[in-house]
Image (cartoon, helix red, strand yellow):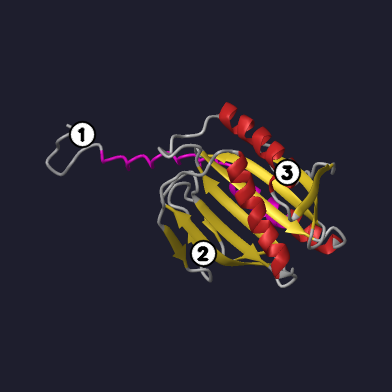
Amino acid sequence: MTSSRRNILSDLAAGVLILLGAFVVFAQDVFLRPALEDFIDKDTKLVFPAIIDTFQKVRVRKNENPVFGTVVRYENESGTCADVYIYSLDTGAKEVRRDEFEKHFRETDEGILKLAEQNVKIKAVSRIEKPARETTPGDGREAYYRIESTAAPMDSVLYLALYRGKLVKLRVSYSPDDAEEAGHADKFIDFVAAMLVEKPQEAKRPETAPAAKDAGSKDGTAAGA
C-alpha cells in the first residue's frame, strides 16, 4: 500500500470523527504502547496479540479522552491496514447503551458514505453488498464500501460491536482487485469479532463434601458433637 493510500485511510478515520462531532477543543495526551507484544486494554480486558493471521501489530495509541479512546493498528506485508478502535460516546466514559450503539452505527455508515463531500482526495464512496459470513458473530454490525480516491480505489470494511459498555470498531482496507487480501481482511475481522463474544463463566464445581468422621472418637465422644 502506498503512503498516499495510507494518508487517505487516516483522513477517512478523521473525517468520520468530524462528521459525528467527536472532536473536542482541548488537547489530550496520547500514550504510545509497544507494538511487538500483546496489548491488554484495561477497560475491556481485551487482549490483542502481536500477530493476527498475516497482520502484525505496529502501533497502539491510547488517548486519555475516552471519545478518542484507543487505536490498535495492524499491517501486513502486502500493505493492508487493519485498525481497531475502542472508545466511548462521551468524555465521561459512560457505558454505551444498545440503542446508542445502533444509532452510532447508522451515523458512522452515513458519515463514510458522505466522505467525498468532506475530503478532496476522495472522489466517491459507495456501499458494496456482500453475503453475510457465518463465521462472524451476529451481535455486531458490518458494512462494505468501495472508495474511489485520487490515489487508487480500495475496498473498506466496517465492523462495529458493543462490548462491556464500549464501542469496538474495526476498519480494514485493501485493493478491490486482491481477493487474497479480502480473505485476510475477513479472517482478521472474524478473529477480533470472536473476542467480543462474552464467554459464559465455567460452572462452579460443587465443593467436595468433607470426609465423614468416625462415628466416635477415642474418648467415646460422638462425631460432630
**Residue 133 visible in the picture:** yes
Residue in front for this viewpoint, 157 or 150: 150
Residue 91 in the image, given as x and y percentages of width and height: 43, 40
- Residue most toward the left? 219
Residue 192 in the image, given as x and y percentages of width and height: 63, 52
- Snapshot quadrant of residue 191: bottom right
Mark nearest the camera among 3 and 1 is 3
- Disc number placed over residue 38 in the picture, else none: 2
How far, Cα to Cα, is label 2 from label 1?
53 Å
Left or right: where 123 falls relative to 27: right
How far, Cα to Cα, is label 3 from label 2?
38 Å
Q: Earlier in the sequence, mark 2 or mark 1?
A: 2
**184 is higher (above) or lower (below) than 12:** below
Q: Earlier in the sequence, mark 3 or mark 2?
A: 2
Q: Main secondary structure of the magenta part?
A: loop
User: Tag 2: residue type?
Assistant: Asp
Q: Secondary structure at mark 3?
A: helix
- Residue most toward the top? 99
User: Tag 1: residue type?
Assistant: Gly
Residue in front for this viewpoint, 212 or 143: 143
Q: Quadrant of the C terminus?
A: top left
Q: Secondary structure at mark 1?
A: loop
Q: Which residues are magenta?
A: 187-214
Residue 58 in the image, given as x and y percentages of width and height: 58, 68
**42 is higher (above) or lower (below) than 165:** below
- Snapshot quadrant of residue 112: top right
Mark nearest the camera among 2 and 1 is 2
Judge the density around disc 2: few (<14), some (14-19), many (≥20) Cα neighbours within 10 Å.
few
User: Tag 3: residue type?
Assistant: Glu
- Snapshot quadrant of residue 6: bottom right
Q: From the image, tell me which residue sits under label 3.
A: 117
Q: From the image, tell me which residue sits under label 1.
A: 224
